[in-house]
Image: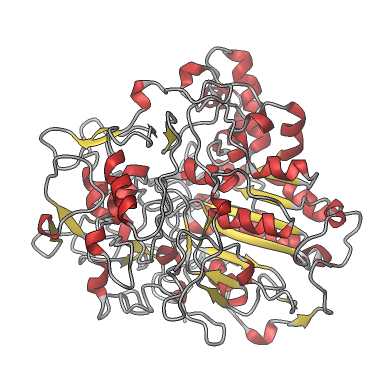
C-alpha cells in the first residue's frame, strides 16, 4: 500500500527492500593492506592500513541526522540508534509521542549582550497561547520556471548531466504552489503545530517538494544550542540543550516584509522526514545494507563555507594579506552579534569574521568563557591577531585560477595546509570533483575577459546560456579553491580540481584517484529551497551505478556519504564542543564498502575531520599541522553512554565502521 503523502511520480529511487533479491557474495579473504589488482590503477603502489585503496567522499547540503533519519529503525541485528523515534519524541508515523516534551523549544526575553546560554528564568516554553514559530515557504519556488528551480528547460535540454536521464524530470517537480514567505500550509497542521518537531509528510508534501530555507550562521548556531555549565548533567556533561532553534531564527534579523530584506526563516528548523514510510528512500536503503553513524557532526557551527574548509584542512580559515600573514578584514565584514538597542535579539552586524583571541571583541567572550568552564581542555584554538572566517565568504580564486579583485571582499588566497598538500607530498593521487565545474571555468574566462576589474559569473551566464549551469558550481564548497598551493599553481589546479563528469569517467576507466571528493552542483545538492533531497539521491545514485558496473574497483572502494552541515535543522543529539568553532549538530554519515555491510549503526563520536583521520591512517600520513583537529585522539566512551567521549576532545578515525576481516558484496540498490 502506498503511504499517505506519496505521489505517483515517485520513481525508481523509491526502493523497496526485497531480501530474496539481494545476493550476498562473500569475497575471498583479503589480508589487511592487500587487495585485488584493478588494471593499471596507480593507487595500488601505495601500502594502506586496510584493504581500502580508494576513498570517495560525497557531500550533500544542509540536512541533519534527526531531520533525515529521525524515524528510522536499524535493520542490522542488535543495532540501536539515537533518534526521535528511539527517544520516544515521535511515533513511527511522525506524530508526537510520550516524550515529545524532550524536544520543546523556548523563547528568550531581551538580553543586554550576545549570549550562548540563558538562565531558566529568562526562558519561556512555546505553548498554545504563544505558538512556536510555524514553517513557512522561505525562498522555495512557487511554480515551474525557465529561470529558476523547478527548471523545465534544464530538464528538457539535458544540460544537467550529473544524474541519470530518467531522473531529469525531478528537476521540474516540487514547486510549492504558494506565495513566497508565507505559512507553508502543505505541512499538516501548519499554523497550529505544537512545540516540537513535525513531519514533512502529508497529502500535499513529501521529499520531492521544495521547502523553506533557514539561516544557519556561526553565532546563531552557538546561540541555538543554548550551552551552559548550569545545564550540565551526567548524561550531558557539556550542558547544550538545543532548545532555541526557532527563536533564534525568528529574532536575530527580523524580516522587513515591505522591502523583502532580513530573515524570513520561521519554524522550518523543526521539520523532519519519515524514513520508515519511504521518504529519503535511497538513503534508507543504503543504511539498511551498509553502515550509518548516528554520532557524526558538522565540524563548525554555522554554514557551508567554513564546514567545507574544515573538511579540507582540519582548521579554520583566516583573513590574510595574500602572502600568508594575518591581516584585518574590512570593518563591514567583522561580526558584532550584540543586539541592537530596543530589539530582542537583532544582531548589530551579522558579519563573517571575528578575532576570537581577543575576548573584548563582540560575541567572543561568552563562547570562550563557556569553553573555559568545561571539565576537559577545549581550547579556543584562536591564534593572536587572526580574524577567522565564520560564515560564507568566497575563495580568493575564481574557478579558472584568476585572483579575485580585493573589492569583491573574497577571502584572500589562503596559506592553510590542506589534505591535498599532504597527499601531494607522498605522491598519492587525489582530486576534488565539483558539479558544473567545467562550465564555471568557461564562465570565469568570459567574465574576466569582459571585465577584469570586476568579473561577474552571473553576468557571463546571461551572455552565455550554453554554460549557464556554471553558476550552480559551488565555489565555497571547494576547500582547495581557497588554497594558494592548489589554485595558485596551474599544474596543481589542472590535476586536482575537476568536474563530476571526470569522476564518472575515472570510475569507468579505472583511473580513480586514491582520494576523491565529490560535490554536486546547486541544483542537485539537496539544499532546502533551492534543491530537494531526492535530487541529491539522484546524484548519488548516478555515481553508485557507475561504481556498481566496475566490481573490482567497488571491492576496494569506500564511499562516504555525508553533508556539509545540518542547515539549521534541529537535532536531539549530543554536541562535543572542541574549540571556538564547534562542533555543531549531528549530520548523517553513510559508509559504503564490502567491509561495512549489514545495516550497522556506529556510535563513536566523529565529525568532518574524522574523514581526514581515516585518510591519514589508511595512507600513513601525519596530521596536517600542529593545530589541526586531526591531532585529536580517538574517543573512549563508557558502554552505558557510547555517544560521549570520556577523553574529550576526541574524534574517531572511522575505522570502527569496518570489519576488515570480512568482505560482502552488497549491491548498492536493486
Instruction: Looking at the picture, tell me which residue is in the foreground, 217 or 633.
Output: 633
Which x, y percent locates residue 275? Answer: 46, 72
Which x, y percent locates residue 392? Answer: 44, 37
In the displayed structure, 575 sits above or below 420; it is: below
In the displayed structure, 128 sits above or below 518; it is: below
Instruction: Looking at the picture, tell me which residue is in the foreground, 485 or 356.
Output: 356
Instruction: Looking at the picture, tell me which residue is in the foreground, 616 or 37.
Output: 616
Q: Is residue 87 visible?
A: yes
Which x, y percent locates residue 417? Answer: 62, 38
Q: Residue at x 47, y 39 (%)?
A: 148
Which x, y percent locates residue 282? Answer: 57, 67
Left/right placement of residue 232 relative to residue 543 reads left
Residue at the limit of the structure toward the right, as seen here: 40
Q: Which residue is drawn at 28% across and 62% down?
A: 241
Left/right placement of residue 27 relative to residue 228 reads right
Please say which color scheme the image uses. Answer: secondary structure
Left/right placement of residue 580 relative to residue 255 reads right
Q: How many labels does the image show?
A: 0
The C terminus sits in image quarter: bottom right
Instruction: Looking at the picture, tell me which residue is in the foreground, 44 or 442.
Output: 44
In which image quadrant can residue 4 be found? bottom left
Q: Is residue 178 visible?
A: no
Amino acid at each position: 500500500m502506498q503511504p499517505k503523502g506519496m505521489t505517483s511520480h515517485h520513481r525508481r529511487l523509491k526502493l523497496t527492500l526485497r531480501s530474496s533479491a539481494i545476493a550476498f557474495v562473500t569475497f575471498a579473504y583479503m589480508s589487511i593492506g592487500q587487495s585485488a589488482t584493478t588494471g593499471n590503477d596507480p593507487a595500488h603502489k601505495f601500502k594502506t592500513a586496510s584493504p581500502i585503496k580508494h576513498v570517495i567522499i560525497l557531500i550533500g547540503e544542509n540536512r541533519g541526522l534527526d531531520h533525515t533519519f529521525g524515524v528510522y529503525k536499524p535493520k542490522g541485528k542488535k543495532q540501536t540508534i539515537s533518534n526521535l523515534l528511539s527517544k520516544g519524541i515521535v511515533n513511527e508515523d511522525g506524530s508526537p509521542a510520550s516524550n515529545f516534551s524532550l524536544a520543546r523549544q523556548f523563547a528568550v526575553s531581551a538580553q543586554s549582550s550576545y549570549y550562548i546560554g540563558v538562565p531558566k528564568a529568562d526562558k519561556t516554553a512555546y505553548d498554545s497561547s504563544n505558538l512556536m514559530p510555524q514553517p513557512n515557504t522561505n525562498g522555495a519556488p512557487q511554480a515551474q520556471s525557465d529561470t529558476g528551480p523547478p527548471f523545465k528547460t534544464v530538464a528538457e535540454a539535458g544540460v544537467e548531466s550529473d544524474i541519470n536521464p530518467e531522473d531529469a524530470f525531478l528537476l521540474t517537480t516540487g514547486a510549492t504552489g504558494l506565495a513566497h514567505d508565507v505559512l507553508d500550509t502543505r505541512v499538516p497542521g501548519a499554523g497550529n503545530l505544537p512545540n516540537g518537531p513535525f513531519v514533512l509528510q502529508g497529502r500535499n508534501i513529501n521529499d520531492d517538494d521544495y521547502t523553506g530555507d533557514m539561516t544557519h550562521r556561526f553565532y546563531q548556531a552557538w546561540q541555538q544550542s543554548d550551552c551552559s555549565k548550569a545545564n550540565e548533567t551526567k548524561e550531558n556533561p557539556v550542558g547544550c540543550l538545543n532548545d532555541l532553534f526557532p527563536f533564534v531564527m525568528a529574532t536575530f534579523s527580523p524580516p522587513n516584509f515591505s522591502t523583502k530584506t532580513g530573515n524570513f526563516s520561521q519554524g522550518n528548523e523543526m521539520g523532519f522526514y519519515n524514513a520508515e514510510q519511504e521518504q529519503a528512500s535511497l538513503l534508507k536503503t543504503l543504511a539498511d545494507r551498509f553502515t550509518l553513524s548516528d554520532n557524526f557532526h558538522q565540524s563548525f557551527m554555522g554554514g557551508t563555507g567554513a564546514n567545507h574548509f574544515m573538511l579540507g584542512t582540519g582548521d579554520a580559515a583566516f583573513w590574510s594579506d595574500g602572502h600568508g600573514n594575518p591581516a584585518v578584514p574590512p570593518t563591514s565584514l567583522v561580526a558584532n552579534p550584540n543586539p541592537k538597542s530596543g530589539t530582542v535579539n537583532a544582531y548589530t552586524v551579522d558579519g563573517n569574521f571575528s578575532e576570537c583571541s581577543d575576548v573584548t571583541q563582540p560575541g567572543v567572550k561568552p563562547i570562550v568563557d563557556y569553553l573555559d568552564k568545561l571539565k576537559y581542555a577545549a581550547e579556543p584554538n584562536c591564534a593572536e591577531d587572526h580574524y577567522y572566517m565564520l560564515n560564507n565568504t568566497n575563495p580568493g580564486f575564481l574557478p579558472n585560477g584568476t585572483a579575485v579583485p580585493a573589492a569583491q571582499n573574497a577571502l584572500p588566497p589562503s596559506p592553510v595546509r590542506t589534505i591535498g598538500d599532504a597527499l601531494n607530498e607522498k605522491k598519492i593521487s587525489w582530486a576534488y570533483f565539483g558539479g558544473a565545474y567545467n562550465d564555471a571555468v568557461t564562465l570565469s574566462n568570459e567574465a574576466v575577459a569582459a571585465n577584469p576589474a570586476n568579473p561577474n559569473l552571473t553576468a557571463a551566464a546571461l551572455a552565455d546560456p550554453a554554460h549557464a549551469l556554471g553558476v550552480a558550481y559551488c565555489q565555497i564548497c571547494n576547500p582547495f579553491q581557497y588554497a594558494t598551493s592548489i589554485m595558485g599553481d596551474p599544474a596543481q589546479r589542472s590535476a586536482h580540481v575537476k568536474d563530476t563528469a571526470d569522476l564518472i569517467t575515472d570510475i569507468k576507466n579505472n583511473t580513480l584517484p586514491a582520494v576523491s571528493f565529490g560535490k554536486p552542483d546547486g541544483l542537485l545538492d539537496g539544499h532546502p529551497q533551492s534543491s530537494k533531497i531526492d535530487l541529491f539521491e539522484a546524484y548519488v545514485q548516478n555515481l553508485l551505478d557507475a561504481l556498481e558496473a566496475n566490481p573490482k574497483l567497488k571491492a576496494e572502494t569506500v564511499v562516504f556519504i555525508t553533508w556539509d552541515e545540518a542547515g539549521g535543522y534541529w537535532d536531539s543529539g549530543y554536541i562535543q564542543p572542541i574549540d571556538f568553532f564547534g562542533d555543531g549538530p549531528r549530520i548523517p554519515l553513510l559508509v559504503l564498502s564490502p567491509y561495512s555491510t549489514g545495516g550497522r549503526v556506529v556510535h563513536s563520536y566523529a565529525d568532518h575531520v574524522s574523514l581526514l583521520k581515516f585518510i591519514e591512517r589508511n595512507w600513513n600520513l601525519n596530521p596536517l599541522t600542529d593545530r589541526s583537529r586531526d591531532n585529536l585522539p580517538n574517543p573512549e566512551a563508557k558502554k552505558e553512554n557510547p555517544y560521549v567521549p570520556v577523553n574529550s576532545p576526541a574524534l574517531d578515525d572511522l575505522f570502527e565502521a569496518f570489519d576488515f576481516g570480512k568482505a560482502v558484496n552488497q549491491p548498492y540498490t536493486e
